[in-house]
Amino acid sequence: MLIAVVIFMFLAVGSEVAAKVYIDVDSPNFQLFPIAVCDFDVTYVHAAAKSKDSGIELADEVKRYLTMAGFFNPLNKKSFLDDKSARSPSDAIIFADWAMIGADYLVKGNIKQSEKETISECRLFDVIKGDLLFNKKYISAGNDLKALAKNIASDILFTLTGDEGDFNTQIAFVAKKVNKADIYMVNYDGSDRKALTNHRSIIVSPRWSPDGRFLAFTSFKDGNPEVYIRDLKNGSERKVASFEGLNLCGYWSPDGQKLLLTLSKDGNEELYILEISNLKLKRLTNSYSIDVSPAWSPDGKKIAFVSNRGGSPQIYSMDTDGNNVKRITYEGNYNTSPSWSPRGGRIAYEGLINHKYQIFTIDEEGNNLLQLTFNAADNESPSWSPSGRQIAYSSKINSKSKICIMNANGLNGRILQENGGSLTMPMWSPRFK
């Protein structure tokens, strides 16, 4: 059950402390936050039939989400010199004990559970300064400790970085068995996998709308590669591009009113903008080369795409009217699948190096190239998280592929999904409230 949560700050030290950015996680010298998360103290009202380990479970879930965020190193509680929960901010905390075990930050809290609701109080401390950074109360209907933990972890991340993270997101991907595929979706933590389509055909390029309500994709359901838009709220689907030849889905515009397409209806593959409301097309490219894989910049002013106009597939950018075309990548002979960071400034893509595809990022001027993956797998289809601080991608060895997530600097990788056939083309959703 999703949590119906009311969150409010009822104590703050200083002014606007929860909104302050304390540490730059984008710094090249950044190291994981050492953080101690104590088991939450539990009180049961009217002998509520809840697990006696709820406090341990909540602490473990908070640590799990903080680890997934890629910026924290939750310390082993066996090293704690003081593992008792402080029941109020005024309780004595010996910060030197926490500093001795290497903690920079400390989380303490308690839970009060009844048959109808769970109330949790959580406090975050700066161990080095001895400061209380926030004291928040969370009220939830029922006993959804995972949702509570997600909200607590999000507040911790926001307090320390100024960004709420990607906890309330989902990742769509294509799962293929034999020659039949469909689009599936999982939560940020890899849970609650469910099918979004039932085409049982070749299906590629899932693309979320900016509000998360719609999913665009290309399907061979009726024999020809055609572009569909699915309403995820009511389950309805409609074709929006079914021209003769190739119809490939690109990214949505930031305002959700347009969709980029690759069409071959007039000969070779060219790029178009489709207006969703009236299905009106506007052609962007007109060359003898192959132009594919268009992706909008977050400000809606530019489009990245792939073209072989220089002799091999490379990443280019242009204005949204098709003018001012500029080549971005020069290293390597095969670069494709551009994905623009929501924060702007950098483009992720896959490039062929030493006979394997690896994930790279580069700035939008074509400088500061950074290789993120180095293993023996084919790593493909990068997709940025809404925060712009993590990247999802598919990783394939032999015939098996899985969906992975890493930080934008290539560190702290984890497997999101690896069972259920070939898993490819991940696409990160916007944040959901």
Image (cartoon, grey):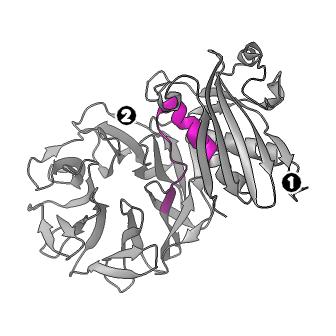
Residue under the image location 31 percent in, 37 percent down: 362
Whether residue 376 can be seen here: no
Residue at numbered disc 2: 370
Q: Secondary structure at mark 2?
A: strand
Task: Using a 10 Å C-alpha cutoff, classify the residue at mark 1 as few (fewer than 14 neighbours), some (14 to 19) or many (20 or more).
Answer: few
Direction front: furthest residue: 10
In this view of the protein, which residue sits in the foreground, 417 or 340? 340
In which quadrant is the N terminus drawn? bottom right
Q: Is residue 55 magenta?
A: no
What count of labels does the image hold? Answer: 2
Residue under the image location 14 percent in, 44 percent down: 326
Q: Secondary structure at mark 1?
A: loop
In this view of the protein, which residue sits in the foreground, 245 or 272? 272
Does residue 223 lie above or below 160 as drawn?
Answer: below
Q: Position of residue 166 (x, y in %)?
A: 51, 47
Q: Is residue 156 magenta?
A: yes
Q: Amino acid at mark 1?
A: Ser
Direction bottom: furthest residue: 222
Say which mark, if any, is on residue 107. none
Q: Position of residue 254 (x, y in %)?
A: 28, 55
Q: Position of residue 155 (x, y in %)?
A: 57, 39
Residue at numbered disc 1: 51
Q: Which residues are magenta?
A: 151-172
Q: Amino acid at mark 2?
A: Leu
Horizontal side of 41 relative to 390 (left or right) equals: right
Residue under the image location 53 percent in, 53 percent down: 168
Does residue 28 lie above or below 277 as drawn?
Answer: above
Q: Position of residue 432 (x, y in %)?
A: 48, 57
